[in-house]
Every structure is written in C-alpha cells, then in structure tokens.
Image (cartoon, coloured by chain):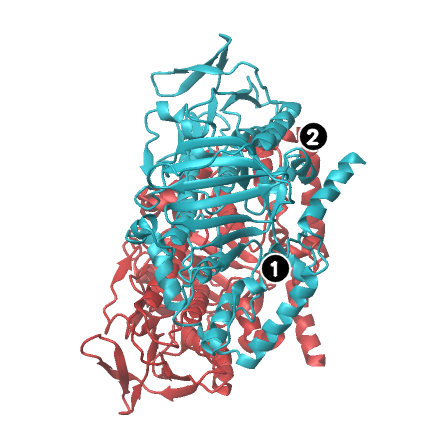
Amino acid sequence: MSGAPMEVVIVGRGLAASMAAVQLVQALPSRQVRVSVLAIPAVGDGDPEFGVEATLPGFAQWNARYGISEEALVRQGCASFSLGTAYSGWSAAGGSTFQPFGEIGSALEGVAFHQLAERLRQAGVAVRLADFSIAAMAAQAGRFGRPSPDPRSPLSLLDYGLHLDRKRTAELLLRKAGQFGANLPTAGLSDLVVGKNGEVEAAILDDGSRVSGDLWIDASASAAVLSSKLPGSAWVSWDQWLPATTVVAMTRRSAVPPAPYAHVVAEAIGWRRIVPTQERFTETIAGDESAPAVEQTSDVEGFARFRLEQGRRAEAWVGNCIALGTAATMLEPTAPFELHLVQRQLEGLVRLFPAGAGTAAERREFNRHFAQEADRARDFVIARAILCGHHGRHWDRVRAMTPPAELAAKIALFRSRGRVPLLEGEPMEEADWASLFDQLGVRAHRVDALADALPIERLQAQLTRMRQVMIAAVAPLPLHGEVLAGLARRQAA
Amino acid sequence: MLTRSLQHIVVVGGGTAGWMTCAALAHKLAALPVRITLIESDAIGTVGVGEATVPHIRFFNQTLGIDEAEFMRATKATFKLGIEFRDWARLGDSYIHPFGAYGEEIAGVDFHQHWLRLHRQGSGGDFSNYSLPVQAARRGRFAAPSQHSGSLLSTYSHAYQFDAGLYGRFLRTLAEARGVRRVEGRVVDVAQDSASGDILSVRLDSGEEIAGDLFVDCSGFRGLLIDQRLGSSFQSWAHWLPCDRAIAMPCEGRGPLTPYTRASARGAGWMWRIPLQHRVGNGHVYCSSFLSDGEAEQQLLAELEGRPLAEPNRLRFEAGKRAEQWKGNCVAIGLSSGFLEPLESTSIHLIQLGIGRLLELLPLHGWDPLDAAEFNRLMNLEYERIRDFLILHYCATQRDDTPFWDHCRTMELPASLGEKMELFRQRGVVAPYREGMFLEPSWLAVYLGQRIVPERHDLRSEAVNDAELEARLASMEAACRDAAKSLPSHQDYLAQIFALAEAA
C-alpha cells in the first residue's frame, strides 16, 4: 500500500484514550497509520476520570502484548492485584459474598461444578460455591498469586485483574505511546470542523494550529465532545433499568496495604463501591435522587460529583468517528466492565481497521459487536440489581421493573434448571452467572440429569478433596502487600 | 411446571438417528431409573445415505467407549480429511474444504491476511498449499493426527466415511447390551392428552400399546409424531436451497481409496462420491424444477466408476427445519427435525448435537417449557448457520451455463449470509459467532475456493516486509508438503490399524 499515511486522532487523554493510543500505535504499521492524542478541557464539577478503577482478568496480558509490563503498571501506574469483587448487603439474607475471577470448582464428567453443587444441596449437603474458588479463598486471606500454567495445579484455576490509578496509568500509557511513535501535541482541543457529510475534518487546537484526521476516536468520556455533535450517534438510555444517576466519587490516602479485591455495598439510596490500590482508594457512592452527602475530610485527594446517564450509543462508529469507552457506553461500575468494553472495542477496531476506500462493512460489523457486548455487560449488572434483596426506595424501584428480555430468559432458565442461555458478546461465562445467582440466593429448582447420574458419595469425596487441595495451595501464597512491596524493591534494586 | 417424572423414554424409529440416540442415552443415563424403548419396523427402510461425517463424531464414539478399529471394521469405514468440491465457482475448479487450519498466525495477525496481501501482489501461491490435510488428501495419504501439540501433524482433525446402515446396527448392539428394549412394529395410533396434546402412548400394528414420558421422534422425513401429531410447522428454505431430490446408488470402487469425500457440481445440483472399504457411495442431489428424475438418474449412472451394487434409492425432500424441534414431550432428532442436503456432511452432526442438548436439558425432575425453548433456540442457531454455509456454496459462483446456476447466482440471500459475505468480500474478515459448527477455516476454504477474493487486506500485515513474508510462507508451504509426503497412504494406514487391532 502506498500514499500518505492515515491520520488517526484520539480525542481525550484519559485511560480509554491512552489505551487506544498504545494499541493503535503498536498494532498498526507506522508507515500506514499515524496517531495523535489531543487533550480536552475539563468539563463539569471535577473530572470523573480520576481515582482507581478495577479491571477484569486479562488487562495485564493485554498491556504486555503492546509493550507495557505488569511491573510498569504496578510501579508507575500504582496498580495492585484483584481477585474479584466482594459484595455486602445485596442478598436478603444479609452478609457478604464474593464474585471471584478464575474458575470455581471443576467439572466432573462434563457436568458443570454448580450443577454438582446443586445436586449435593438437594441431598441436604450445604455447599458454598465461593468455597471452591482459589481466588475467593486467597482474597479472604489477603493473599495473592499468579495462575500456574500447569493444568494439574489448583493454581491454574486462578485468574486476576488489576486495580489501577486512572491518572497515573493513563500517563504511563501515553508516555509509552509517545515513545512508540504517537504524536502528543501540547496544545489542547479548542474547536472541531465537521464537514457537510457529517464527518469530522479537523480539530482546531488552542494554540490556533489545525490537526486534520481521517479517523477520529472519541475517548472524551461522558463529555463525548465529538459524538455528541455528530448526527446519527443517538443515545439508547438504560435508565429504566439502572436508575442510579447521581454519583459522588472521592479518592483518599490509605496507609494499609490494599485488599486484593473491590468491595461493593448495597445501601438504601443505591450503592457504594470501594476500589483500593497502593496508598489510596476510591470510594464511589451512587443513588437515584439528590446527591448523597459526603464529608470531605483532609485525606481526600480527589473529588468529583457527576450525573450518570446509563446507556449506550445506538452505533459507536458513525461516519469517520468512533466513540470509545464511556463516550460510547455508560454503565454503573458494580461489576468491572468499563475497561473490558474498551478493550473489546479496540480489539474490534484493530481487526476491522480501515484498509482503504470504504468502511461500510467494517462499521456494520464493529457496531454489531459493540451493541452486543455493551448489552450483555448491562444485563449482568442489571441482574445483580434486580435480584438485590436490599430494602429502600432505590431497590424497591429496581425490583419492580421488567428486565430486558435476554436477561429475563437467563434468570428464568437458571431458576428452572441452573442453566444460562449465553448469547453473542457475553463478558461472563455460565459459571460467573451461577456465582452471581448463588450470591443473591437464587437457586435452581432442578439439577441436570447428568449430575444425578453421579453417585452422591463420589461427589462428596470429590468436593472434600478439591477443598483440601485448594486450601493447601492457598496457604503458601504471599500476602498481597508483600507481593507489591517485592515489586517496589525490585525497582529500588 | 409439571411434576410428572421421567421414567420411560420411547424412541420412535431406528436408523442412524434412533440408534445414536439410544446408545448415547443408555450410556449416559445408566445410573438412573430411566427405561429406554426403541420402536422400529424392519418393513420401513431407513434413508441411510448419510455416509460422510465431520470430526465431532470421534468425540461421540469416544464418549461411548467405542474402539476405533472395531468401529471402522464394523462399518466398513475409511478416513476422511475433508471434502473436495469440483466445478462449483467455475467448471474445472477444484478445492478441498479440510478439517484443519491454514498456515500460522504471523505477528499476531491471521495467516490468511498475510496470504491475501501476497496474493494481491501476485505471489503466495495457492491458499490450499498451506493446509496439511489438503496436501495429504491430494496425495491420498493419511495418518491420525499427532498428540504432540507443537507438531504440525497435530494441527488437523479427521472424520470417517462409513456405511450408516452398518453404524446403526453397530450402535444397536451397543444400546441393547446397555438395556435398551427394541420393539419390532409399526406405529398405527398415537394417544394424546386432550388438554396439553402431550403424547401418552403409541399403539403398534401388533396391538401392543407403549406408554412413555418422553418421546423422541426419529421417524425420518415423515415426522410421525412431531409433524403428524403435534403439528410443529415446517419452515421451508427451498427458496435458498432449491434441490429437492436425490438418487443414491453404490458401486464398486476403482483405484485407490481417497481420504476425502467429493462433491461435484452438475447442471442442476451436485453429485457425491464417498469411498468406503467395500464400495463407493454415489448420489445425485438435484432440483426437480430444472432436471427430470430420468435425466438425473442417467447422469448419475454415466458417472459411476464401477459396477452398480444396488438399485437406485430415490429420495424427495425439502430444505428447512421444524419451527419447534422439541414440542410438548416430543423431541425430533434426525430427519424429522429438518433437512439440509448432505453437501457438508452435517446430517449426523445435527443428530449428535440434538442428542447432546437433549441430555443437557433432559427433564428428569419435572417438565418446564423453558427446556424446549432453550433446545429450540440452540438448534435453530445451528441449523441457520449451517444453512448459510450451504447457501454460500451455491451463491458464490460465476457459473452461467445452466438456468439452475443462473438462479443460484442471482437469488436473494438471507440477510445473515449477505452481511457475512459482504464483510469478507470487502475486508477478508470472517464474522465470528458463538454457536455454530463451521469455524473460520471452513469459511475461508469455501470463500477462497469459490473465488471470493477480498478487496482489502489487514493493514497489520504490512508490518512484515515482502521478502520476509515470502520466506515465511515458503517455509510453511514446504513444511506442509513435506509433512504430507511423510504420511503413509490411506490404504496402508487402514491395513496397519486393522493389523494392530488383530494382534492386540
């Protein structure tokens, strides 16, 4: 291919923008594609793109693929490790539950572990799914280890995500993107030139210079500075299902080593989420009415108050502009899907990156995946909300709604027989859904015939042995704080 | 939810579907208090032309603990590495759809994107040069894939070509040994619950009345229960897959045993050739609006490579499927659930999928219509995706030598296929999906084999320079060729595994 390289302009300098910069610069050949990343002016009452965010498993591996090591994320992005999310106050029975990463138990003769567990329960044996998750057990003990590549090791069932300091991680990724060849002008975005055809032509920067682009990535978070100006990128609201609209977030200093998990608490007005990382944690409080009162104490390092309009764009890629991350999808973070959706969008973009004249086929395929992935993540979040046993106006309102049809089908089939109809674009697998339902006290009426065909004694023996092996595997793992301190020492050395 | 229990499963119809169902259910449910009865009549023939399979059949056999050599001996089976398609895009064309991938990913980018880049520059050679199973098949060679995951010889899979009638008999022995009761007879009446329509019992010509809780309709095209009794409507796909007749006729084999099936396009349909140990299966699938039965038979006879071994077996069908394959307490498995022509050897696979999903959703502890809804959702997806894949063979053509091909070339496509094809044609990307048996390499084989060459390739391929890319591809091509040459001939390999089994 010859001719001038294609100019890609990323608008925004938050985490999604910096991820896009790294991936596009690294994955696409520099002779064909040039990438610029523009800063945008701050909008509203504080920047929602601050604080600590949690990821699903695979984030560190994704970064490693594009030349950013896990060590760099921990040391420069102030990341810590995450084994899942703890939930308090969600089940009617009260107490806390854990949604772990990695596998929960092991299948036997092709029968899923949650089916085996249900079979035992129906025979009168009490079984908690999380008791068979290495991640949940390690998290409870404050320990952390990486998965074993040896499939015979119980540690091969483990998986982990990260807790990242958004600002520092974005800075790290942008710096790397710059080293890899991205153009990072110091002047910020001031104005846009949109052509009659509805395509973005150029950006005017605040020093008066002009940046023209062939493909635009709107990574400006909820401001959506490009997408909100373009015809055709309509917003599909989810507020009939997810009525939390008022969010207050603050980041505080912390002297104790971070827990290797996030914590989400259901409260009368909505929910509260705590995501810790090294030396700080972010607390987010969300509700559907007037802003929750918060005390701004002296240890508060950052603070933001904003409106959350949950939903997604009908199409993320319109004309020559692609809305990325929260510019495209706004979903309350009671499960850590935000960066997963960014990753999925970027993987789709690289796979379908314009390669000459015409992008209609690529756009349609990209938008199909985008819609499916956003909607399936939405369903997982709604499931937790609609099945929440907490009392209070917010939850009563959520429980009264009719769930999306795809989610209703999942809940119904799970209640009936412990199976989940999985669709295209699911961020979670059946075992994760089974864990979610288990935490919220939803039980299956029937177990699989194939589970019934296995003798109870064999199942009991199997689970006892599994539990012993897991306990033995978790005990020697180092404490999470020690792992982080070890990585810091390596820096000093 | 009904609380009626599931104690007795009645399978109506023998044949491949009936006996596969019984063998699997009897094996998987052995520990449970569930009885299984199969009703079949020796007076009713089975279709039994589905002689070619896909690799998934190996998993089915392994699950049942079937020894490969014993099974192959009993069913006169041969090995299969893929299907050769002749004359589909243009007269004189030939490509093989193999059970295996093409080339290797380079710099994190799919192999075919790199190939495409070179191809557009006029180098890179034939796409099939990068498929070991194609190279082996073209040379008449075969060996079971290696178990060592690093080896090139582990990158393909295989299936069988066998006598489906013998396979049914083989499974019958297995099923009866595991407690399945076989009842000889013809169903003459069906008793249904007046309120729900559920089937309560069937009466045989002997007068015997057989009651059951779950009925599996394996009665073939007739759909004795699912259609005639429960009225599950038939969704016709004849406007996309217009072939509606087939004539099957085995003959004596000539020449070496090919480790692949052949599907040759003809003026108003196509002909199959399936080499077994003792004979070659042949058939002509055609569209009756474009070709008379007499002409179709003459064309088939003219192409037989050896002496015919049976009278022609004439079949009539319509492409499509039941709207509900599970309705009430009746599940249709096999031809009673729908029909897709055997162009990609999917009939036995659809039986296997139906059995697997029935086992997963078996209402052992009470009935809930949600089980049927989930079964139907999954089977519908599978059927529709196979349908699209089959239509691709017909619509991706440049043939204009007969009115039949004019129709196929210009017909309106299902939107799901039209979009997939457009994406490939524009950009060389195979649209991925969650459920569906045909994966990316299969779509690539047919798209490229039928001359759909994408207009653009992935820019990321350009990260590798031309000289390096050409060297990488040349080395992959040589590796495939050398590995293929290192394999024994199909005939020798068969003799070897039978000798080993004998010695054991």
Q: Nearer the viewer, residue A274 or B336?
A: A274
x, y percent for residue A163: 58, 42
Q: B416 left or right of B75?
A: left
SS category of the residue bearing label 1: helix
The answer as to whether the residues below labels 1 and 2 share one chain is: no
Looking at the image, the residue that sits furthest to the left is B194
Residue A134 in which image quadrant? bottom right
Amino acid carrying label 1: it is: Met
Give the answer, above or below, for where B483 lies relative to A297.
Answer: below
How many labels were placed on the picture? Answer: 2
Hue used for the chain lettered B? red
Chain on which label 2 sits: B
Q: Residue B467 — which label?
A: 2
Q: Nearer the viewer, residue B58 or A46?
A: A46
Q: B233 left or right of B178?
A: left
x, y percent for residue A25: 60, 28
Hue used for the chain lettered A? cyan
Q: B218 left or right of A119?
A: left
Give the answer, above or below, for where A236 lies relative to A471.
Answer: above
Where's the N terminus of chain B, which quadrant? bottom left
Say few, some or many: other residues with alpha carbon within 10 Å of mark 1 (under 14 / 14 to 19 / 20 or more). Answer: many
Q: Residue at x 57, y 30 (%)?
A: A167
Residue under label 1: A137
Say few, some or many: other residues with alpha carbon within 10 Å of mark 2 (under 14 / 14 to 19 / 20 or more). Answer: few
